Amino acid sequence: MLAILQAAGWPIWPLLIASIIALALIIERLIYLRREKILPKALLGEVINVYRNNKVTPDIINTLETNSPLGTVLAAALRNVDAPRDVMKESIEEAGRGVAHVLERFLTTLGTIASLAPLMGLFGTVVGMIEIFGSQNASGANPAQLAHGISIALYNTGFGLAIAMPALVFYRHFRALVDSFIVDMELQAVKFVDVVHGARK
């Protein structure tokens, strides 16, 4: 491995740092963005039961808010349970925007790495080409310098693509996952609003 890094030259180090950051972000998002953690199955039913049994207290609302992202949205609804429907929906939308921001955390960085890695690899290719042209002199080419330039060009290009492809796949996967979570949260919040305002029995 060390021999490959030496053959790839100094342009490989920014790519190596980018790959470590991308891997850390992918692992963190895989752990955080689990459906049972974001949208606990029984939570809506429990909140409806609490509301129907008139057991809504500030402590319950605070506990609900720290329970999960869905809990944060439903806690905003419970805080405005006596308000008109429009006010209640507006408070849910505000809480939803905050939750969406938390769910999307680090995705921009991952997307940036996916876009930037091939360019960093291309930069390594250019450095390698400069080495190749630098190996030419009046008496011909220096074979060792020529080989080093070729290895810099190829290793950096390959490594850049190897980072970009999985980073892009996971970026798209996480974006779709977050979008589906947000839609599910909106649907559950609307159900709760309907229960409160008597549209659903």
Image: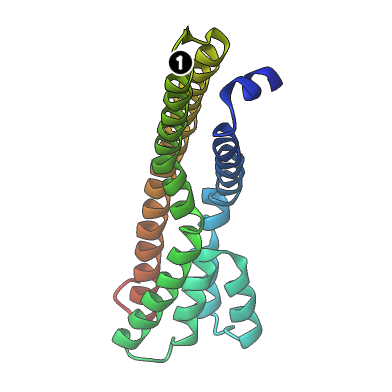
Q: Secondary structure at mark 1?
A: strand
Q: Quadrant of residue 87?
A: bottom left
Foreground: 101 or 23?
23
Q: Quadrant of residue 197?
A: bottom left
Q: Is residue 29 left or right of residue 166?
A: right
Q: Is 119 displayed left or right of 37 in the figure?
A: left
In which quadrant of the rendered image does the N terminus lie? top right
Q: What x and y, as percent, mark residue 150?
A: 48, 16
Residue 148: horizontal and vertical position, in percent? 55, 17
| Kind of residue at disc 1 | Asn
Residue beneath the point at 33% across and 90% down? 84
Q: With 12 as the anchor, is 89 left or right in this view?
A: left
Give how far across and how far down residue 170 sits, in percent: 46, 39
In the foreground, 49 or 123: 123
Q: Is residue 161 above or below residue 144?
A: below
Relative to 160, residue 58 above or below: below
User: Residue lying furthest right in this view?
Assistant: 2
The foreground one among 121 and 54 is 121
Residue 100 percent location from the top left of the image = 43, 64
- The answer to whether one can see residue 180 in this image is yes
